[in-house]
Image: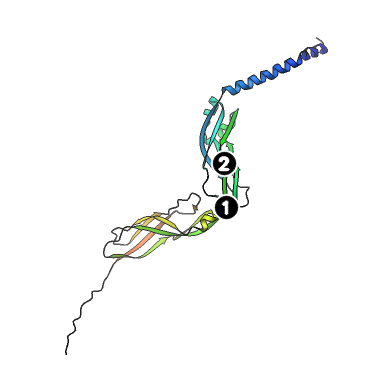
Amino acid sequence: MSNAKFLDKILEKWPVKVISLIAAIIITIFHRMSTLETRSFSIPLKLETNNQFIQSGSFTDTVRVSLRGNADSIHSIPEKDIEAYIDLSKYKNEGEYRIPVQIRKKGGALEIEPLEIKVIPAEISVNLEQKIVRNIPVSPVFRGTIANGYELTSQSIIPDSVNAEGPRNIIENLYDFLTETIDLEGRYGNFSIFINIINENPLIVIHGNKMIEYRGTIRRIIREALQDVEVEDNE
């Protein structure tokens, strides 16, 4: 067959052939889509920050991801191989921002195709403040009463302050850290106890040891006896 006849054969009824080819592609795509499954689960939301600013206030710490792909493939992906994060490193001023949630694939998830990943919510509202470090005093908390006839004469806290890091507004308005409760009930002698510092704010980081040593000195109360002096009337 000559080249001209071969070309004529190919071009014969070419609109029908093109339509048939497109239809075949569409059918293939729909078939593949119909065989895909969806798997959903929740994962932690990580914040990637710089050394200048930090989030202030509450925010969503988990997001829900949806994986769509071949059934066997998506169910073989460990949840730890999908990371959700927001990138705060590019922001240079305090303020409130709407930041998109990004997805990072790791491990076995890198090898899965096709794999469609959706995340809910797609954006997170974050309030950014300057990150500062400040030395904060530690105050002991007591309960109970020392034994009758005794008193607490002196005390020491080691260390008596710690460095705390966090959002500017929170750290500037933090006046002290409290300890867990120290029980004084019935004590009549000197004592030393190691006790944790309480920090219930997840936005604050205490540097170094988060425990203090409390030393108390207890002494017996000495009361001078007052004697009545009878004064004779010599008159």
Point out the tag, 2 or 1, that comes first from the N-terminus.
Answer: 2
Residue at left 60%, top 43%?
A: 99
Give, as a three-letter code, the residue at label 1: Glu
Give, as a three-letter code, the residue at label 2: Tyr
Q: Is residue 136 left or right of residue 192?
A: right
Q: CA distance from mark 2 to mark 1?
A: 19 Å
Q: From this viewpoint, which residue is outermost toward the top?
A: 1
Residue at left 58%, top 22%?
A: 34
Quarter of the image with the N terminus in it:
top right
Residue at left 51%, top 33%?
A: 41
Q: Is residue 135 left or right of residue 112?
A: left
Position above or below: 58 against 121: below
Q: Position of residue 132 (x, y in %)?
A: 55, 56
Q: Secondary structure at mark 2?
A: strand
Q: Is residue 223 left or right of residue 120?
A: left
Q: Position of residue 235 (x, y in %)?
A: 16, 90
The residue tagged 2 is 85
* Neighbours of disc 1 within 10 Å: few (<14), some (14-19), many (20+): many
Q: Nearer the viewer, residue 192 or 226?
A: 226
Q: Secondary structure at mark 1?
A: strand
Which circle marks residue 181 in the picture?
Answer: none
Q: Position of residue 205 (x, y in %)?
A: 50, 52
Residue at left 80%, top 13%?
A: 8
Quarter occupied by residue 11: top right
Position above or below: 210 against 98: below
Quarter occupied by residue 118: top right
The residue tagged 1 is 129
